[in-house]
Image (spheres, rainbow, N blue to C red):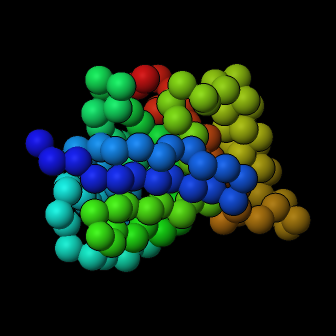
Amino acid sequence: MAVFALEVLTPERTVVSTEVEYVRLPGADGTFGVLAGHQPIMAALGIGVLEFGPFQGRRRKIALGGGFAEMHENKLTVLARTAELAEEIDVLRAREAKRRAEERLKARQADVDVARAQIALQKALLRLRVADEK
């Protein structure tokens, strides 16, 4: 199968820079896939699992916190708000983030930003799911 370049970047670091056969991305309007030779695209990404492979002989997963993807000249660049490979996820930290988000949502106090708490809960649940699937 043909390969193409994949680069996943956050403001802090390069998460992945490698050649892959496929990538499945969490688009803002649903999941979509990219293979070598894909037409140029630019797409908004939601919170979800980015799956790619093979890398070191297996498929890999990243917990992606939204962003943008651009496919151009057989290179897919993902600019993500946050991105963690499954094996990098600190499960205890993710559980604690989930607990805090749930507490903020239960409190329903005037100073609680409900939308931010819901996003925090969604990200924590995603991180736990991706870590569990590694």
Residue 97 image position (x, y, % from top left) = 72, 38
Position of residue 75 measured from the top left corner of the image (x, y, whole percent): 35, 62
Q: Residue at x 30, y 43 (%)?
A: 20
Q: In the image, what residue occupies the spot 50% across and 44% down?
A: 16
Report the front residue among 18 and 105: 18
Asked whether residue 64 is in view, the answer is: yes
Q: Position of residue 80 (x, y in %)?
A: 56, 59
Q: Is residue 87 rendered to the left or right of residue 45?
A: right
Residue at 23% across / 48% down in the picture?
Answer: 3
Q: Is residue 115 left or right of residue 3?
A: right
| Residue 118 seen by the camera | no
| Quarter in which the C terminus is drawn | top left
Can you name the residue that lies furthest to the right here?
Answer: 111
- The answer to whether 95 is drawn above or below residue 74 in the figure is above
Depth check, front residue: 130 or 24: 24
Point out the image quarter for the N terminus. top left
Residue 128 vertical placement versus 78 (above, below): above
Quick check: 38 left or right of 95?
left
Position of 3 compared to 111: left or right? Answer: left
Q: What residue appears at the point 77 percent right and 65 percent down from the top-left corner?
A: 113
> How many discs appear?
0
- Give percent across and percent down for residue 9: 57, 55
